[in-house]
Image: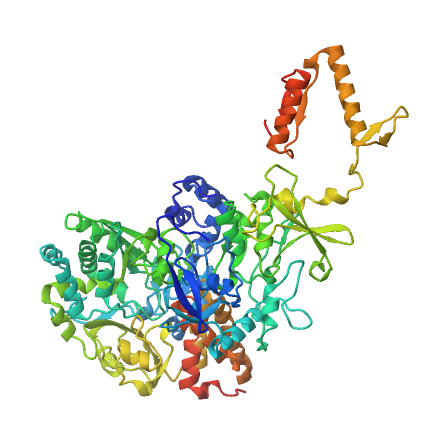
């Protein structure tokens, strides 16, 4: 039984300090926190960074790393006598292939430099620009009525940049309408969608924009505590963020800001799974409603935003919502596009929201080889054929094309890649990252992955005869967005590349 | 049904399959449907537990909602319209049940196997044309080394609805079992994968009772228990004075299983303890004493009537008191007695025999 005042929120961090889940560490954490041993055991085993004790190399299995020879690299590392664990995307697709060494420090084997959009003061995020520590937007907000701030957000047309594209001002308003006065602001920095590394660059280069945005949000929704949930694999980013918080301690004195590390679970990027994880539980998404703005962290109203979304706020305050809105091409604002794969200059580019793939690739140094496909917004968005290279990369158009904007992690694929294999890599990711809570996702991700695997081995399309119906049920029946989109890579690959799924010899 | 005390309960009408039904705030779609006799299948639902919405079997169409929603968790609101039967829902059930079958041990008929407990998934699968998906061979581990005497976990029958872990937490507050790992590896585990005896488990067996598929079974139950013709006899547990109600299931005059009446029916609300559920071996034990016995001059025990037996005890105790004094006697009462019986025992000791040497086995 959980003891009164048990400190459940500490358990995952404590397990990490004790080197991972063992009978001994679980017993110690139970004594320290008052949480039952079984709960600690079950929670710890959910998170790959603590589930298995001991040190080893963690080699990225993301789509881009696979395209650039992760399998071969795994063999080489093993031949050197290293213990290698294959892990889901490490968020280093521009430098692929990538790994974390035994001490969790980043080692990349591809390009050595990340390209970003050059300094341009007209860009809201302007990654390459000078660091502004004045926190003058926060000061300005403190002189404005809250309604006016929210009106600017509304005029800006700011949509959530984590993937859902939900209008930000709705959430801020909803929080202000709650009778409960204990409220929280949470920043979702659990960037783990294969192909995505924009928040990484934002934290490394412009973390004060994000911190200022969080402080503005906290001021407007009247929260005192801010939690930043940062994926555990972002070790360097943790250091940068921690020192940024220290540097700005006087400007941020009104707020209690905590960085909470993730421990290796993609699903914790789903906002309610993130809240469960913050509360020291298995990262299993909650049923909605209630939504976090009503009942979030510790059951209190909680404003959750992606790093990029919240980092747009200071510029909107300075220059006005209308200005931000006008920066977009088909939808409001500028957008950080991550691009990797078969292009010349992988990196993060801040461009008008709604540019086409061709425009994005032009900024990224052009295509390599003969492109056949692209994944516009991470594994969740499936694949589109290169014939759609002029489609605006925005929330509405991509959705209508049966794909999604997602996290804008664009991966370009040329004709050296077997599309059935590309689909398999993405499905493997979803099987590994499904939380296992609901049957459509838990069984479906494994079923579809295995069937594609069998197809690749046997070349018999009959192995995939039921995949469409199973994918339908995953979309209809799953609790959260992961299960809903987990069949997309196969579904879209079969739709757009039927020749890749014919009888093979 | 838990209603927060502070909230006013409103009564209103909702539409279920076009039929107007009375509903109250705080109720779920499944609550109302069950009252109205409208069948919505469920697997992960147990009225004693917070709704989990995890098995997805109860998904229904709620007007205005793009996605199917879990009837077990979806709260009713005035004038809402719910559809529980449609082509979309039928397709959902067909594919979902077929997916469950791909992750479940099947019998020769291709249906989910039945163990000593009813497998509700099996019954659901009989209502569809299965798609016969290839098995997914989930790497779900059990606890083969668990040597506890009562509870067995069969991972190939587990649907991960987490009723057992939620019951252990929310009802018993014991937290011996947990969901462990994730995705297709998810399983039911204990801290350190230890046997239940070496955990906080009290072996109440409530997990067996709530398991909808028979993945948790009583080790000593006959394997073909479900197909056996059994007689059910309602009784009161006499292991302590609480008065839990039991249903004794007997076959050929022998008790083969004990369960609690359904939650909500009796004071034990569907729950039993280790003794009530499992300690029935004595019923048919050859050493069991079923009538009063007095040892005769010949040194053997002979059956007598209760009156004779009580008279013999009274005479013997009175003689001891006369010869050695009242404090040479001591009385020990049993924890199987009620409070009233214990009271009478101390009255017998103090008032009838005049000694304060009275104790009860659970009072130390």
- Report the residue that reaches farthest toward the right: B298
Front position in the image: B352 or B216: B352
Tell me, yes or no, if residue A348 can be seen here: no
In this rendering, position of residue A369 left or right of residue A501: left
Quadrant of residue B354 in the image?
top right
Quadrant including the C terminus of chain A: bottom right
Front position in the image: A99 or A447: A447
Q: Is residue A501 above or below residue A13?
A: below
Tell me, yes or no, if residue B173 can be seen here: yes
Q: Position of residue B29 (x, y in %)?
A: 44, 64
Q: How many marks?
A: 0
Q: Position of residue B138 (x, y in %)?
A: 55, 66
Q: Position of residue A13 (x, y in %)?
A: 38, 49
Residue drawn 32% across the image and 88% down it: A387
Q: Is residue A331 above or below residue A6?
A: below
In this rendering, position of residue A54 left or right of residue A312: right
Q: Position of residue A30 (x, y in %)?
A: 45, 42
Q: Is residue B343 above or below residue A234?
A: above
């Amino acid at each position: 039984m959980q003891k009164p005042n048990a400190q459940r929120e500490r358990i995952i961090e404590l397990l990490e300090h004790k080197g991972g889940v063992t009978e001994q560490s679980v017993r110690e954490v139970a004594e320290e926190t008052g949480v039952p041993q079984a709960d600690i055991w079950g929670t710890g085993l959910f998170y790959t960074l603590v589930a298995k004790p001991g040190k080893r190399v963690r080699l990225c299995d993301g789509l881009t790393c696979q395209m650039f020879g992760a399998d071969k690299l795994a063999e080489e590392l093993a031949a050197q006598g290293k213990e290698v664990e294959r892990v889901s995307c490490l968020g280093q697709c521009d430098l692929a292939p990538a790994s974390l060494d035994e001490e969790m420090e980043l080692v990349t084997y591809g390009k050595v430099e990340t390209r970003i959009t050059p300094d341009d003061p007209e860009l809201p995020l302007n990654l390459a620009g000078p660091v502004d520590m004045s926190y003058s937007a926060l000061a300005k907000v403190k002189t404005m009525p809250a309604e006016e701030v929210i009106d600017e957000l509304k005029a800006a047309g700011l949509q959530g940049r984590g993937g859902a594209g939900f209008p930000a001002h709705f959430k801020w308003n909803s929080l202000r309408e709650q009778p409960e006065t204990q409220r929280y602001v949470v920043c979702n920095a659990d960037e783990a969608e294969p192909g995505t590394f924009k928040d990484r660059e934002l934290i490394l280069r412009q973390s004060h924009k994000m911190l200022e945005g969080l402080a503005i949000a906290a001021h407007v929704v009247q929260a005192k505590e801010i939690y930043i949930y940062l994926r555990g694999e972002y070790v360097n980013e943790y250091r940068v963020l921690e020192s940024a918080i220290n540097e700005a301690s006087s400007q941020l004195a009104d707020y209690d800001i905590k960085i909470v590390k993730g421990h290796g679970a993609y699903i914790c990027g789903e906002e309610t799974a993130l809240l469960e994880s913050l509360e020291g539980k298995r990262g299993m998404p909650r049923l909605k409603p209630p939504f976090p703005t009503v009942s979030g962290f510790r059951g209190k109203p909680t404003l959750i935003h992606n790093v990029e979304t919240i980092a747009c706020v200071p510029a909107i305050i300075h220059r006005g919502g209308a200005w931000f809105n006008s920066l977009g091409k088909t939808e409001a604002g500028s957008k950080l596009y991550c691009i990797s794969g078969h292009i010349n200059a992988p990196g993060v580019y801040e461009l008008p929201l709604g540019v086409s793939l061709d425009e994005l690739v032009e900024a990224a140094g052009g295509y390599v080889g003969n492109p056949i496909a692209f994944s516009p917004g991470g594994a969740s968005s499936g694949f589109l054929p290169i014939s759609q290279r002029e489609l605006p990369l925005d929330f509405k158009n991509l959705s209508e094309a049966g794909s999604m904007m997602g996290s804008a992690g664009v991966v370009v694929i040329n004709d050296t890649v077997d599309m059935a294999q590309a689909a398999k890599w993405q499905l493997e990711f979803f099987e590994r990252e499904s939380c296992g809570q609901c049957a459509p996702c838990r069984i479906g991700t494994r079923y579809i992955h295995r069937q594609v695997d069998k197809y690749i081995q046997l070349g018999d399309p009959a192995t995939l005869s039921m995949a469409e119906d199973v994918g339908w049920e995953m979309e209809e029946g799953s609790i959260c967005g992961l299960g809903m989109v987990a069949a997309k890579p196969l579904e879209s690959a079969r739709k757009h590349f039927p020749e890749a799924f014919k009888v093979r010899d | 049904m838990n209603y927060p005390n502070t909230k006013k309960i409103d009564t209103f009408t909702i539409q279920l399959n076009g039929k107007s039904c009375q509903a109250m705030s705080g109720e779920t779609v499944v609550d109302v449907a069950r009252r109205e006799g409208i069948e919505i299948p469920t697997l992960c639902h147990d009225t004693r537990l917070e709704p989990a919405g995890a098995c997805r079997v109860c998904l229904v169409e709620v007007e205005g909602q793009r996605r199917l929603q879990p009837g077990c968790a979806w709260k009713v609101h005035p004038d809402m319209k719910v559809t529980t039967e449609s082509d979309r829902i039928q397709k959902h059930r067909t594919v979902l049940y077929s997916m469950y079958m791909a992750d479940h041990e099947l019998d020769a008929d291709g249906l989910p196997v039945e163990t000593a407990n009813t497998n509700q998934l099996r019954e659901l699968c009989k209502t569809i044309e299965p798609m016969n998906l290839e098995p997914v061979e989930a790497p779900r581990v059990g606890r083969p080394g668990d040597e506890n005497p009562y509870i067995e976990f069969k991972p190939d029958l587990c649907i991960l609805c987490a009723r057992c872990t939620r019951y252990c937490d929310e009802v018993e507050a014991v937290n011996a079992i947990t969901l462990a790992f994730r995705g297709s590896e998810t399983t039911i585990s204990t801290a350190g994968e230890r046997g239940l005896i070496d955990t906080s488990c009290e072996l109440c067996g409530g997990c067996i009772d709530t398991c909808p598929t028979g993945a948790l079974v009583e080790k000593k139950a006959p394997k073909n228990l479900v197909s056996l013709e059994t007689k059910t006899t309602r009784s009161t547990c006499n292991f302590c004075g609480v008065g839990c109600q039991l249903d004794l299931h007997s076959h050929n005059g022998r008790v083969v299983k004990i369960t609690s009446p359904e939650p909500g029916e009796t004071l034990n609300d569907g729950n039993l303890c280790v003794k009530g559920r499992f300690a029935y071996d004595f019923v048919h034990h050859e050493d069991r004493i079923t009538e009063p016995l007095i040892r005769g001059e010949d040194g053997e025990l002979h059956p007598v009537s209760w009156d004779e037996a009580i008279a013999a005890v009274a005479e013997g105790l009175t003689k001891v008191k006369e010869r050695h004094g009242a404090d040479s006697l001591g009385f020990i009462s049993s924890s199987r007695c009620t409070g009233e019986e214990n009271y009478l025992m101390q009255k017998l000791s103090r008032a009838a025999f005049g000694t304060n040497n009275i104790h009860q086995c659970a009072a130390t």
